[in-house]
Image: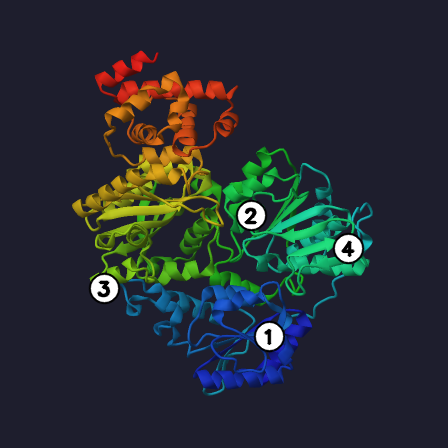
Amino acid sequence: MDIARSLRAEARRANERRLLVLAGDPDRTRERAATALDLADVPSAETTVVGPEPFLDCEHHEQSRAEELLGRTRTAVVLDAHEELRPDAVGRTVGAVDGGGLYVLLAPPLETWPEERDGFDASLAVPPFSVEDVSGHFRRRFVETLRAHRGIAIVDADTGTVEQDGLTDPPPSRPVPSPTPPTDAWFRAETYAQCLTDDQRDAVQAFESLRDDGEAVVVEADRGRGKSSAAGLAAGNLAVEGRDVLVTAPQYRSAAEVFARAGHLLETLGVEFARDRATNPQRLDVAGAGCVRYAPPDEAALLPDGPDVVIVDEAAALPVRRLEQFLDAPAVAFATTVHGYEGAGRGFSVRFRDRLSESDHALTDVSMTTPIRYSDADPVEVWAFRALLLDARPPVDQLIADATPETVEYRQLSAADLLADTHLLREVFGLLVLAHYRTEPSDLARLLDAPNLTVRALTHEGHVVAVALLAQEGGLSASTRATMYEGGRVRGNMLPDVLSTQLRDEAAGVPVGQRVLRIATNAAVRSRGLGSKFLSEIRAEFADHVDWVGVSYGATPELVRFWADNGYNTVHLATSRNATSGEYSVVMLDPCSDDGAALAARHREWFQDRIAAVLSDPLDDCDPDVVRAVLRATDGERPVSLSEWEWQLVAGVPGGASVLDTNPKPFRDLTRRHLSHPADATALSPREERLLVRKVLQAHPWSTVTEELAFVSERECMRTLGGIVERLTRLYGDPWVQEELDRHL
């Protein structure tokens, strides 16, 4: 295994990393890995094994816990892929290897590896499919990249044969000069002494603006550029000056480096401070000054205890709706990874920049491109980006600028099509990354290998304008449906699962459907009818083969209206917010057969039966415009079935809106009827419909409704509601009810 010694020596000389692939029998690859690391002079204390067995005397994690390496550096990481290869584990572990280090991959023989089925493949085999239905396209492409890239050695562990040595003969690395501290810095001089690159110095200085209210900073960087460290240095300084700094990230581990760097700076400055815990602290309190504290996004968005500054790390992994909430902070910073599994950096810039520019904050932008832990020319980073498509992008705007529903082509894209055309694959995956706040390397493997997934696209002159990822669901056996109904875990089949387990409809798993898992249209050509064109083509293709087409997503008024306009009906609204997005998820169906229509009809009815009750309890904080939209999308005319006494209560409202408190039920029935299927869609203004939602359905206090909807007084708010009920009574009440109404006017 002299090759390991040579690789390490070359890596150290160039401050780069090298990848060593040991392929063959599991036991033999592990033996050779131990020998290789010994010959390469890698200490056990600087080594981590990621895989099923702790076969070396060093740190060990399962692939499912690869995130433990986030924010850390190791001289060597050994990824044992014999039992499974998780793409996310590759993305998380490769970035942990420091310059001069080795990334060691243990694998079956490369010639046969794509044909084998492992634990990750089993996770792609959702019912009714089996693991034999999973293809090996992702690993086939993965192997091809290993053989094609510089800096990668491949050794047959069974025979000791070196297939390729991975040596590149690079020039020696040149010392990187320490950045010059800025002459006009506000942060302490010790801060800039800890910066390792000019990029990091510039980022830290940009954070200085956060000492003033009304400032915003955006820091974009590839992984390993030191953005979290820069944020930590800034947070420490701000805390010393008395600021309350609130830090948030999708998970604490993403923000751990912020706290580590802030704590180290406070120690360097010699100030007295306290940690809330010895390891992985989530709060640093500076004596007589400020603090640095962590909260998860859903809590942080409420700006608890009025922070002076908010720092959002890995911001691109959060949806725009959540990011917007942080703009209410006096000063705010967004740090995000441009590429990589942490989030879609370009998506962040495209989707959120407009909202940020419209805010009252003055914006400072920083881009960090210089790696800190290894050289700019590091071949392992180049390989990882290609193997996992971490830098995938949709086509540039100019190539699709003229796209219209008339010029685009609807295409059925097989895995073979995507593998045969690298540019097509990059455009498809790049658009999916752009559109969704959390797209990971495992999604690339699913796209290429999962038997239940289908890829469709609209192209303009050969370039991808829109892409959809569809998942086949339903058609489940009686035993699988019974397992699901009783709360057992069944992979995939999200919509049948929700309808079965939460709504107690065991038969929901019988009809076969296609769920729109992801759909994305390039931002440059939105609002041209392309999304509707796309859904129409999808329905035309699948209508004769499935019972329904469905979707589940975080509800916003605009999105609900879009899906409703394209024939989708509301059947469920979740009663708890998604912790990441902050939105309530809605389930909508477009029936394609009699069985699909029956499924949609009964759940549409059940939804209307229960919605009034849940809106006054778990959904009492749901956006009234979302409520209006999901009710309007039920598309089912339900008669108003009120007793004589209930109609008398309704007719009495114009004489005093307090009658509402006597028995809210008839008012809720009347409101539900109008919002779901109005006899006259112009009878009420949007503001009046919001009043019905907030007061009648969600039972908010008069004072709250008055303030939110900008009424002059509670009395005016009550009079307005009385007038609304009068109009609805005349629309839906029998003649005798209207006569009763006239008695009160």
Cα distance between the residues tagged 1 and 4? 30 Å
Q: Which mark is residue 299?
A: 2
Q: Secondary structure at mark 3?
A: helix
Residue 93 in the image, given as x and y percentages of width and height: 54, 67
Q: Position of residue 186 (x, y in %)?
A: 79, 46
Label 4: few (<14), some (14–19) or many (≥20) C-alpha neighbours in 10 Å: many
Mark 1 neighbour class, 10 Å CA radius: few under 14, some 14 to 19, many 20 or more:
many
Q: Residue 438 in the image: x percent, y percent?
A: 47, 53
In the figure, is residue 584 to the left or right of 57?
A: left
Comparing labels 2 and 4, the label whose residue is closer to the camera:
2
Q: Amino acid at mark 4?
A: Thr
> Dots 4 and 3: beta carbons under 8 Å?
no
Q: Quadrant of residue 58?
A: bottom right
* Residue found at the very far bottom of the displayed protein: 159
**Which one is earlier in the sequence, the residue at label 1 or at label 4?**
1
Outermost left residue: 594
Mark 1: which amino acid? Ala
- Res 479 label: 3
Amino acid type, mark 3: Ser
> Mark number for residue 76?
1
Q: Nearer the viewer, mark 2 or mark 1?
A: 2
Whether residue 466 is visible, yes or no, is no
Q: Which quarter of the image is occupied by the C terminus? A: top left
Q: Earlier in the sequence, mark 2 or mark 4?
A: 4
In the image, residue 52 sits, relative to residue 334, either above or below, namely below
Using the image, determine if residue 111 lies above or below residue 670.
Answer: below
Question: Which residue is pictured at 37% across the width and 66% down the height?
Answer: 123
Please report whichever mark, 4 or 3, sits nearer to the chain's N-terminal start: 4
**Residue 191 numbered mark, or none:** 4
Q: Nearer the viewer, mark 3 or mark 1?
A: 3
- Of the 4 image quadrants, the one containing the N terminus is bottom right
Q: Position of residue 107 (x, y in %)?
A: 45, 77
